[in-house]
Image (cartoon, rainbow, N blue to C red):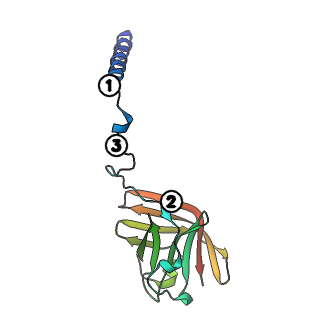
Amino acid sequence: MIRKVALMTAATLVLAACGDSQQVEEDTLPPTDMQTGDVAVIPQLESVSRDAIDVDLDETLGVCTFAADGETLLVAGTTDGTRGVGVISLAGEEVELTGSEMGGPDAISVGPMMFAGDYTVEINRAETGGEAAMESTSYEATMALRKDGMSEVIYGPGTWECSV
């Protein structure tokens, strides 16, 4: 036991001596926001408006928005029987999303999963909602933003509001 303590003490002293003689300058360290290994860096979402979607959404079929902290972060909608479309804004660039499944407005209302290149957006909403603005239903929800299937950012709690 005494031998083990003596070896650990000697090792600690050697490491401490090495640490004093070779200090690393802070400005030689790599930036911390670089993509490394299996971690993908996800830019911060910015507020987006319904006008950002290039497709003419049929208002009678419903348009849904996800909002958190007073900002609309996703606008989604559909035309009859389509997979649906959505838009988010990443680092000042509007990114158009496509729904993962057919189903028209119902597939959007229940909380879609949408894709664009390396990005996946998924809405997870409560089962029951409350009345919002005229002819709209609002649900408590969160939104997951994933990049390359490796990194994830959760936004919320927020609201998933769909017009009827």
Can you give x and y, in whole percent of width and height, for residue 161 in the image? 59, 75
In the image, which is nearer the foreground, mark 2 or mark 3?
3
Determine the secondary structure under disc 2: strand
Residue 55 higher or lower than 148, as above or below: below
Q: Which of marks 1 and 2 is nearer the N terminus?
A: 1
Give the camera-side residue of 81 and 52.
52
In the image, which is nearer the foreground, mark 1 or mark 2?
1
Can you give x and y, in whole percent of width and height, for residue 103 in the image? 46, 83
Q: Distance between the residues labelled 1 and 2?
A: 41 Å
**Can residue 138 be seen from the camera position used here?**
yes
- Disc 1 residue type (three-letter): Gln
Give the camera-side residue of 47 and 1.
47
- The residue that mark 3 highlights is 30
Q: In the drawing, what numbered circle is on residue 22?
A: 1
- Disc 3 residue type (three-letter): Pro
**Can residue 126 be seen from the camera position used here?**
no
- At a point 43% along the width and 59% down the height, the residue shown is 43
Q: Earlier in the sequence, mark 1 or mark 3?
A: 1
Q: In the drawing, what numbered circle is on residue 4?
A: none
- At a point 38% along the width and 14% down the height, the residue shown is 9
